[in-house]
Amino acid sequence: MSMTLNEAEAEALGTAKVVDARGAACPGPLLDAKKAMGTVTVGQVLELWSSDPQTKKDVEIWAKKVGHGFLGVAEGQGYDRVFIRRAK
């Protein structure tokens, strides 16, 4: 379901803000992403770090439901880097 990005692809997205939600269980990381989305401008990329494996699925579903762009997931060291582009 999720698109996997390599390091170069992830860096090319030009992240505007990183939200570190490592160590938090769902729905914590998703709630952090929702709050942070309001702090980036339309068109910018939010990067969410999460050690909860469910987060990437939850964020993908949420982003599609509300109309943001789910850009994919890159592997960090023991966590996922989830990328979302603010669309509205």
Image: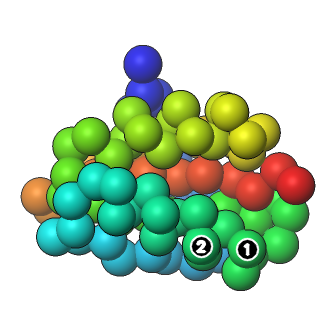
Residue for point 66% across, 62% down: 45
Image point (71%, 80%), residue name: 39
Which quarter shows the N terminus? top left
Residue extending furthest toward the top? 1
Pointer 2: what residue? Answer: 35
Q: Position of residue 80 (x, y in %)?
A: 28, 52
Q: Amino acid at mark 1?
A: Gly
Q: Position of residue 38 (x, y in %)?
A: 73, 74
Alpha carbons under labels 2 and 1: distance apart: 6 Å
The percent coordinates of residue 71 (x first, y second) are: 59, 41
In this view, the residue in front, 56 or 76, is 56
Query: As drawn, is 86 to the left or to the right of 30?
Result: right
Would you identify the image quadrant in which residue 77 lies? bottom left
Judging by the rendered image, the residue that carries numbered circle 1 is 38
Mark identifier at residue 48: none
Horizontal side of residue 28 vs 88, given as left or right? left
**Which residue extends farthest left?**
78
Q: Is residue 73 above or below residue 64?
A: below
Q: Is residue 14 visible?
A: no
Residue type for callout 2 = Lys
Locate the C terminus by quadrant: bottom right
Instruction: Please report the residue visible at 20 percent of the width from the left and 52 percent of the height from the top.
Output: 52
Q: Residues within 10 Å of mark 2 (few under 14, many from 20)?
A: few
